[in-house]
Image (cartoon, helix red, strand yellow):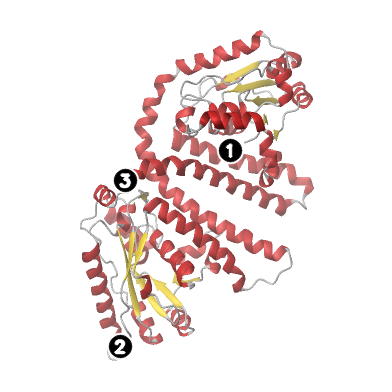
Amino acid sequence: MAENSYFSTMYSNATYDVVGRDLLNLYFQYQTMIWGVTLLIPVVAIFFLPLVMMGLVYISALYLKAYRYYYKINGYTFTPECWKPARYMLACLWDFQARFWYGYEIQGLENIPSEGPALVVFYHGAMPVDWYYLLSKSILYKKRLICAVGDRFLFHLPAFDALIDCFQVYPGTIETCANILKKGNLLAIAPGGVREALFGDETYPIIWGTRKGFAKVAMEAKVPVIPVFTENIREAFFTPTFGNKWLRSLYEKTRIPLVPIYGGFPTKLKTYVGEPIPYDPAITPEEMVERVSSKMEEMIKTHQKLPGNVTRSSICNNTIMFCSIKVSFVSPFTLFILFLLFVFLIRVYHYRYRLFEAYYRDILDGFRTTVAVYWDAVCWVWHGYEMVGFENIPESKKTAALIVFYHGAIPIDYYYLFAKTILIKKRYIKTVGDHFLFKIPICNFWMTVFHVFSGPYPICLQYLKEGHLVAISPGGVLEAQFGDEDYRLVWGKRIGFAKLAIEAKVPIIPVFTQNIRESFRPIKTGKNWLRKVYEKQDCQ
């Protein structure tokens, strides 16, 4: 967010120095409050990372819905073959995520046939990320889709219909599964299902109970069974052991997975695809279950050190060395993904309600409030966000003020302030954004919805005279990218905001967020050269 170049030509006045001193005073006054947030960071992180993973799954689901919608609105006939490009793209993304975060490897991929049917039976971790990665490998390297049997609750999740259609996930009756295999397809199933996912532990017990449906399917379809196990899958995500018996009894009664999942640590994951267990017409389904479970237990004993341990699995596989580096880059990437998600939702709102012009304004107000609630929750959970002096922002919708804020590498603090103002003050802040934002095609409608504009001086003046709140960061992108831990103001000769406040006869409200530069940082390598390039090109 930046001030328009017109502002840089304004004449200097004392307001510039006053605002600068106020920002620094705010910083030093609340410097000691960071300790409380620091203590909570580990607790927040272990619950946040599973949300990130689930968020990526939902991003994939929403992308597929948009992909299918694109075909339909352009008059194309949508067939199952139309999923192939989208499926391949998501496989590439998940394969990259697997390599980057978990150093994912697979051994025995050649055991999955290039043609013909087979039943893949795998051990179910707390979150089956290894299954996503195996599926991606099969699509990319074997050019084959592995259909899957999913728990019934998946079919009740919102926005999952396109994901289920694309990757051919089925509820899993014996007849349905046998027909899929008889058509020459690959089919995957985890006999332990959600029960094994939620109530397994670091000793890797096989919790299949009396389930033998997968064996009946294999016997009826006359196909081989391929056992699959992923090393350290239970060190990647955990379920709490406290209250385990009570939670399990609740699950057995309701079949609803209410057990919280935490973790997401970048342990080394390696999937082992076992040799196929051939179809044998002379054995019973019970004997087939015994063969497969024995093979699975053998693979666990061979490839997994028991009991599982996060630290050991990370150190032995050399991933802990890169943990901090990964987290440093994943957090901004996650923020960007969330931004794209909201852009997509805004587009959906726009297309869905464009025929109802009479209610359009109310609909957008509702959407702004929804997004504000979400950001308010994120700021509290992830950053332990607090505000001091919020009463200084006027509540009256006819009282104008110019908000001047220090620009961090990513202005996440401003999103939080914007959300708080919507929820508590019931006011919208009109924000001056940098010109490059308006060159991003997907952001145009976002800017309209959230009152972001490029900042011509006459328009800023008009908004203030009409009684609106206007926010601006004099340092803009220059301060965001080239500021440092010394928190020096990088405003240069930009003093137009002061001229604007004087002409509009409105107060200036300085805003500074403690530790904003410790939240996100630009890379220092080549900083001087990059600054010269930026100042010459005046773009990012």
Residue labelled with disc 2: 280
Q: Earlier in the sequence, mark 2 or mark 3?
A: 2
Q: Are marks 3 and 1 in contact (CB under 8 Å)?
A: no
Which quadrant holds the C terminus?
A: top right
- Judged from the image, the secondary structure of the residue bearing numbered disc 2 is loop
Q: Rate crowding at label 1 as few (under 14), some (14 to 19) or many (20 or more) other CA atoms within 10 Å.
A: many
- Residue type marked 2: Asp
Percent of width and height locating residue 349: 68, 50
Which amino acid does the dot numbered 1 rest on?
Answer: Ala
Q: How many marks?
A: 3
Q: Is residue 241 above or below residue 8?
A: below
Residue at point 55%, 44% (across, down): 336
- Image height check: is 267 above or below 293? above
Q: Are marks 2 and 3 in contact (CB under 8 Å)?
A: no
For marks 2 and 3, give the CA distance: 45 Å
Q: Which residue is mark 3?
A: 320
Q: Residue 34 appears at what percent x and percent y?
A: 40, 25
In the image, residue 208 sits, relative to residue 371, either above or below, namely: below
Can you name the residue that lies furthest to the top here? 14
Please identify, in this view, whether the residue under mark 2 or under mark 3 is nearer the observer: 3
- Looking at the rendered image, the quarter that the N terminus falls into is top right
Q: Position of residue 305 (x, y in %)?
A: 21, 58
Using the rendered image of the protein, determine whether residue 383 is visible from the camera's viewpoint.
yes
Residue at 70%, 44% (x, y): give it: 445
On screen, residue 411 versus residue 358, left or right, reads left
User: What whole-number distance in Å separates the C-alpha atoms at marks 3 and 1?
Assistant: 36 Å
From the image, tell me which residue sits under label 1: 372
Closer-to-camera residue (115/373): 115
